[in-house]
Amino acid sequence: MTEAKLVPTRLGLLRATRRLDRVTKGAALLRRKREALVSALFKLARPAAEARRQIDETARRNYELLLRAVAIHGRTGLEALALPLREVELEIEAGQVWGVPVASITARPPLARTVWARGVAPGSAGPAAAAAAEGFERLSDLLLDAATREMLIRRLGEALSQTSRQVHTLERRVKPLLESQMTAVRHILEEREREEHLRLKHLSRRI
């Protein structure tokens, strides 16, 4: 950011006063935005922490089921049971929260299915493979449910960091520099007024 040198005139001082007023109001608006972002993040923090805990527990449990299924069917056997692959279509909508662009999943099909919906006969798959498939489908549901909230938390965190930097720049750099320049200009103008007053006084004595 380039600091413009303040012209030591009354017009320059007036312009600097107006700029200082804009800087002060801008910093106040950014502080309010920062408080709103912090409040929004606190509201999301507890549900996000609980969702992460559920995802962690579900993933740990499902990988144990997967290891059992691999031990019975082998990797090639499980890959064969997973065919045919299916596509999952999501509807995503863009929006804004406190001026921050975000995207949210508005519609999606449920991923958890019954054994018959997977197109695999229970006798050929076995309980271990069926349990692993069901577990990872439920894990995928949890991940998709958490995706919008996690993205929102990340975007709000980035916006909070940027807003804090802007507030710091205005309050710790721009405003003090502008105030010091205005003080220097006032001193210059006062000195000029004193010199002009002395000059007029000296001329009046000579007349």
Image (cartoon, rainbow, N blue to C red):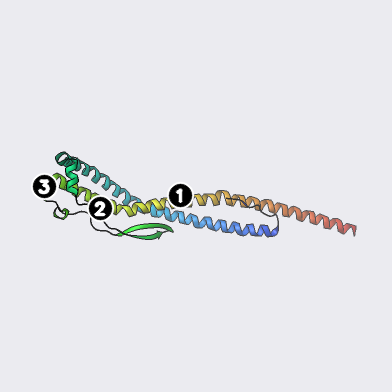
Q: Secondary structure at mark 3?
A: helix
Residue 169, horizontal then vertical, whole percent = 54, 50
User: Could you tell me if the residues under marks 2 and 3 are in contact, i.e. CB atoms within 8 Å?
Assistant: no
In the image, is residue 22 above or below residue 129?
Answer: below
Q: Which mark is residue 124?
A: 3
Q: CA distance from mark 2 to mark 3?
A: 26 Å
User: Hey, which quadrant is residue 14 in on the image?
Assistant: bottom right
Residue at numbered disc 1: 161
Q: CA distance from mark 1 to mark 3?
A: 54 Å
Residue 151, horizontal then vertical, whole percent = 36, 52
Which residue is at a point 54% across and 58% down the rendered structure image? Answer: 25
Residue 27, horizontal then vertical, whole percent = 53, 55
Residue type at mark 3? Ser
User: Hey, which quadrant is residue 200 in on the image?
Assistant: bottom right
Q: Nearer the viewer, residue 76 or 159?
A: 76
Task: Kindly report which numbered mark, 2 or 3, lies closer to the viewer in this rendering.
Answer: 3
Residue 108, horizontal then vertical, whole percent = 27, 58
Other-residue count near label 1 (Cα within 10 Å), few / some / many at <14 / 14–19 / ≥20: few
Task: Kindly report which numbered mark, 1 or 3, lies closer to the viewer in this rendering.
Answer: 3
Residue at numbered disc 2: 141
Q: CA distance from mark 1 to mark 2?
A: 31 Å
Q: Nearer the viewer, residue 63 or 190?
A: 63
Residue type at mark 1? Ser
Left or right, 134 with reference to 102: left
Q: Nearer the viewer, residue 150 or 68?
A: 68
Q: Which mark is residue 112?
A: none
Residue type at mark 2? Asp
Which residue is at a point 56% across and 48% down the rendered structure image? Answer: 172
Left or right, 8 with reference to 148: right
Left or right, 178 with reference to 199: left
